[in-house]
Image (cartoon, grey):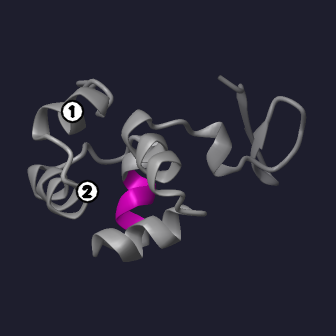
Amino acid sequence: MTEEIKGRKGNRNRTGNAATLRDWPHPLLDALRKEFKWSSDGVMAEELGVLRSGLSKFRHGTNQVSAEFILKVHKRTGWPVERIEFLCPPQVNS
C-alpha cells in the first residue's frame, strides 16, 4: 500500500502526489465497483441509497461497515451476506 505523508498541503502519497481513493483500498467497496462497473464511490453511494460521506468513512476506516449497510448491499446486489461480510476489513480496536 502507498505510504501516506501528512503535512501542510494535505494528504500525500509517497511520490508527493495528492492521495486519491486508489490509495485507500477497501475489499468490499472495490469489489462492488469492479463487478457493477460503478465509476466512482459517488455513483456507488447513489446506487446503494447511502451517503457518499458514509462510504468515505468506511473506505478510510473511520467507521466500520454497519449491518444496515450490509443489508443494503445484499438487497441491491443479491450477494449473500456471508460474501459481503467476508469482504469487509477486520475490525480494529483502538
Q: Kindly identify the amino acid type of the residue bearing the numbered disc 1.
A: Arg
**Which image quarter: residue 94?**
top left
Residue at position x 89%, y 32% in the image: 15
Taking depth in this image into account, of 74 and 7 the one nearest to the observer is 74
Taking depth in this image into account, of 64 and 39 the one nearest to the observer is 39
Residue 31: percent from left, percent from top: 44, 41
Q: Main secondary structure of the magenta part?
A: helix
Residue on which the image places disc 2: 77
How busy is the neighbourhood of tag 1: few (under 14 within 10 Å), some, or many (20 plus)?
few
Taking depth in this image into account, of 80 and 3 the one nearest to the observer is 80
Q: CA distance from mark 1 to mark 2?
A: 11 Å
Left or right: residue 5 versus residue 48 is right
Residue at position x 70%, y 50% in the image: 20
- Please tell me which of labels 1 and 2 falls first in the chain: 2
Residue at position x 71%, y 25% in the image: 3
**Which image quarter: residue 6?**
top right
Q: What count of labels does the image hold?
A: 2
Residue on which the image places disc 1: 83
Quadrant of the image containing the N terminus? top right
Q: Kindly identify the amino acid type of the residue bearing the numbered disc 2.
A: Thr
Q: Is residue 15 magenta?
A: no
Q: Is residue 55 magenta?
A: yes
Residue 60: percent from left, percent from top: 47, 44
